[in-house]
Image (spheres, helix red, strand yellow):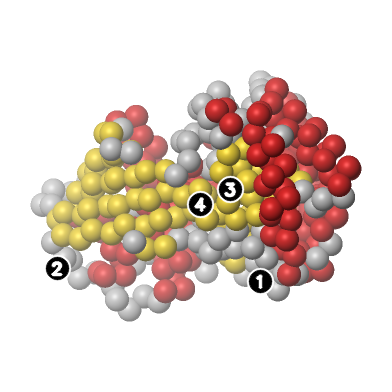
Amino acid sequence: MNTADFIPNNFNFSIEKASYKWQTPSNIALVKYWGKSNPQIPKNASISFTLNNCHTITSIDFEKKDSEGIEFEIYFEGNKKEEFKPKITTFFERILEYCPYISAYKMFINSENSFPHSSGIASSASGMSAIAMCLLSLEKELNPNISEDFVKRKASFLARLGSGSASRSIEGPLVVWGEHPEIPESSNLYGVQFPFEVAPIFKEYQDTILLVDKGEKQVSSTVGHNLMFDHPYAENRFKQANDNLNKLSKILQEGAIKDFITLVESEALTLHAMMLTSQPYFILMKPNTLKVINEIWEYRAATGSNICFTLDAGANVHVLYPKNEKDTVQSFIEEKLSQYCQNNQFINDYAGLGGTKI
């Protein structure tokens, strides 16, 4: 599909009022993307586990209006958030060509997270994907002829224009975003479900997120992505990521968990190496991030566990492990790793199936 496929032809605007509510998850990339071009086109393909418990719940009330133009109010966890409006306004302006109906309605957006906002758990991914699904619910009602598959693909396409990683939060449990020669139907425009059968050990994979730092990041992901334009290692990194996705595809199908551990941890550290070597350089990890990583390495060496870590663009640590080690790893987290979390807080999560209408 191309962008023209998402431009609608006609609508029945007989609907005066409508309301929709969606719960959509965050996701955690296994192969990272860091660097993009306009409009939200990734420099390399990425793949992520869709999460389940880390989600955003968003409702949008649509009220027909006489005036033209984009008009909305945004509330987050019960409070009106004027500071969120510029980013969402930019998003609506980007998608207006594909969703002309949004100018016919005033929108009242209410949103809440199950996890701390802007702390490196991809809150923009779950937030933008939830808005996209609400918009597609309206579009489906305005044009009942569109298919459910089209709804999901267009929602991913729209979500991407708000936050690149949001394209991977519509479906699950494994989603690829970015054109890749070894992934059929992969696209820079939207995410697609990983098209191959994965080995049993990678099904229902567990992810405990250690809340090392619940504060807002000092450097946003948008700024970080832009620093890749003149980065001395950018081109090699983009090639490495695409090569790693090819390797990970085989790992997931064959059940090669030791190779999974090596690749996923290397990807996490490479992401942060790009931050350390950009100009200007910056560090999003905290001292306790490094302590957690070392504890995981020591535990793995001592027990033979298949535990590993990954990081998003933040200080929090995602502890990944197969379901058959759930009890022992969670005991290790409670007894040892929780001391490195703010107020001993962590979130037990697992690979889920994507958005749910409420």
Residue 162 position, x and y percent, is 45, 46
For the residues bearing labels 4 and 3, Cβ distance under 8 angstroms: yes
Residue 311 lies in quadrant: top right
For the residues bearing labels 2 and 1, Cβ distance under 8 angstroms: no
Q: CA distance from mark 4 to mark 1?
A: 24 Å
| Residue under the point 62% across and 37% down | 210
Q: Which residue is mark 4?
A: 53
Residue 99 against residue 36 in the figure, above or below: below
Mark 2 or mark 1, which has the lower sequence index?
Answer: 2
| Residue under the point 46% across and 66% down | 152
Lateral position of residue 18 relative to residue 273, left or right: left
Secondary structure beneath dot 2 equals loop
Q: Give the amino acid at mark 1.
A: Pro
Secondary structure beneath dot 3 equals strand
| Residue under the point 73% across and 70% down | 200
Q: Nearer the viewer, residue 65 or 82?
A: 82
For the residues bearing labels 2 and 4, Cβ distance under 8 angstroms: no
Residue 143 lies in quadrant: bottom left
Residue 111 position, x and y percent, is 34, 45
Q: Which residue is mark 2?
A: 14
Q: Which residue is mark 1?
A: 195
Mark 2 or mark 4, which has the lower sequence index?
Answer: 2
Mark 1 or mark 3, which has the lower sequence index?
Answer: 1
For the residues bearing labels 2 and 3, Cβ distance under 8 angstroms: no
